[in-house]
Image (cartoon, grey):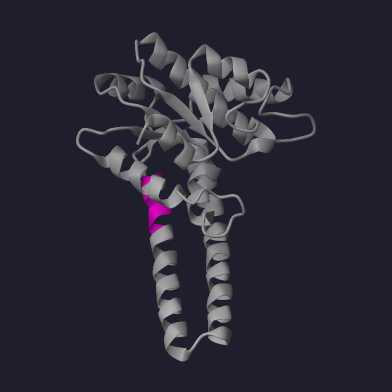
Amino acid sequence: MPSQPSSIAELVGSLRARPVPVIFLDTCAILDVSRSLYREGASPDLAQSALNAHQASRATPPKLYLVISEQVAEEYAKNLPEVLEELRSRIAQITQAGNSLLTATDSAQLESTLTTLEAKLTTLTNQIFNSSLTIANDDACVFQAASRLTRNIAPAKRGSSNVGDCLVIEHILVFVRQLRAAGFDQPCIFVSSNYRDFGLAPNPKATLDSEFAAVSIDFMPDIAAAMTQLGF
């Protein structure tokens, strides 16, 4: 499990003490590690970059911070089983093709390799989640998220009930504003492949773009792009 949720003030104090880059992860950014094997357009470097991010966040002292909100933690727990089932299904399809087209020896070797790959992707996905610092739900942020939804300000949109996305964004914005006010000058990157609600990275939707620019938050579609941006 990731760290126990900490208040924004507590995390600001911790990050100020050891200032290194920060990657804020949306739920899909973590789950995309498992989906990288089969999702069309997935970066071929995603698994390696995720491993590098995990190791960098666990280094002593840390070389970067991975940060999530409580909303992301809840969504991750809810959606992980479905993502892992899809991974197993894709592995089974490839294994079946191997059984049909390869010799018995080669087919058995392929099945063993794919089983190992599935286990390693599952482990890596959980490691990214467990390496993350968690921002505790903040009453002011919850209020602002509801207001954002009512006013249809991205990631909210008319006819949608995506208050979860608004909760994620409001906690990140308030957190980074306080970091910057405290003199924190390290890069901060928000990672999400959810282009429908947040925009097509690196260009957030209107209003989000000015909010991100005001506190120097970059927007990337996956962990691989974020790690490249940071020079890892």
**Residue sitting nearer the eye, 193 or 138:** 193
Picture coordinates of residue 49, whole percent (x, y):
40, 45
Give the dominant element type of the magenta stretch: helix, strand or loop: helix
Residue 210 shown left or right of residue 171 in the figure? right
- Give the vertical position of 67 relative to 36 (above or below): above
- Give the extent of the magenta segment: 122-130
Residue 114 lies left or right of residue 39; in this view the side is: left
Q: Position of residue 149 (x, y in %)?
A: 69, 26
Residue for point 55% across, 51% down: 78
Q: Residue furthest right?
A: 159
Quadrant position of the C terminus in the picture: top left
Q: Is residue 61 visible?
A: yes
Count of all numbered marks drawn on residues in the image? 0
Residue at the farthest bottom position? 104
Is 124 one of the magenta-colored residues? yes
Q: Quadrant of residue 96?
A: bottom right
Tell me the residue at 75%/35% (across/down): 160
Residue 1 in view in this figure? no
Magenta includes 15? no
Q: Nearer the viewer, residue 48 or 12?
A: 48
Residue 196 spot, x, y in % from top left: 69, 37
Which residue appears at 56% of the width and 27% of the height? 169
Residue 36's spot in the image, x, y percent? 52, 54
On screen, residue 158 versus residue 71, left or right, reads: right
Residue at image location 58% in from the left, 63% down from the top = 86
Extreme residue in the left direction: 60
